[in-house]
Image (cartoon, rainbow, N blue to C red):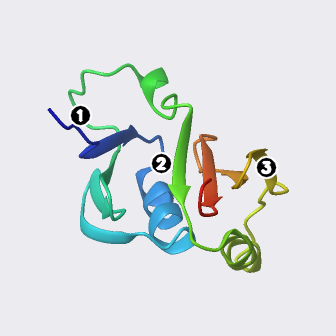
Amino acid sequence: MGMHVGRIVLLVRDFERAVEFYRDTLGLTAQAVHPGWAVFDTGEALLCLRGPWEGMEYAPEDFGRSPDELLFRVDDLAAAVAALERNGVCVGTPHEPGPGIRVAELQDPDGRRVALEERSPGG
């Protein structure tokens, strides 16, 4: 049985700020944005943002806590980093964690680590 990630849901503290980051800063395409709920098409899985809501089953400290990292694959890491830096985003120095893999990291508005990864053929 083949499995793939269909959707990732992030609990975010400041919903509007998170939508702006993922839509306007990272450039993800929003499929839907409703009060407290947004869905972005990442090409492989849906990324959903959920803001705090009345009667929520989560404790306030759950928001912005997990996952530890989101990783987005990019075709051209240098171009992606340059575009983000032009928009005032602080991006860490790209590094090579393995052969044929280059990664640069930044943070979303909740302090969650976001990685951009470029893989060369065979990487």
**Residue found at x 49% / y 22%:** 61
Task: Give the CA separation, mark 1 to mark 3.
Answer: 44 Å
Categorize mark 1 by other alpha carbons within 10 Å: few (<14), some (14-19), many (20+): few
Question: On the image, numbered disc 1 is attached to which residue?
Answer: 54
**Callout 2: helix, strand or loop?**
loop
- Residue at the left extreme? 1
In the rendered image, which residue does mark 3 sit on?
Answer: 96
Q: Are marks 2 and 1 in contact (CB under 8 Å)?
A: no
The secondary element bearing badge 3 is classed as strand
Up/down of 10 relative to 88, above or below: above
Residue 119 placed where, x, y %? 61, 59
**Which mark lies nearer to you, 2 or 1?**
2
* 120, 11: nearer the viewer: 120
* Rendered position, 66 above or below 111: above
x and y, in percent, of residue 76 in the image: 64, 74
- Give the left or right position of residue 91, taking residue 118 as reference: right
Residue nearest the viewer, comparing 36 with 90: 90
* Residue type marked 1: Glu
Q: Residue shown at 31%/64% (left/top)?
A: 41
User: Compared with residue 57, is residue 84 higher up or lower down, i.e. above or below?
Assistant: below
User: Residue most toward the front?
Assistant: 122
User: Label 3: how many residues lie within 10 Å, few (<14), some (14-19) or many (20+)?
Assistant: few
Instruction: Name the one closer to the observer, 17 or 46.
Output: 46
Q: Earlier in the sequence, mark 2 or mark 3?
A: 2
Residue 98 versus residue 29: which sits nearer the camera? 98
Callout 2, which amino acid?
A: Asp
**Gap between marks 2 and 3, in whole Å?**
32 Å
Q: Which mark is residue 6?
A: none
**Callout in the foreground (1, 3):** 3
Q: Which residue is mark 2?
A: 14
Q: Tag 1, which secondary structure?
A: loop
Residue 68: name its quadrant: top right
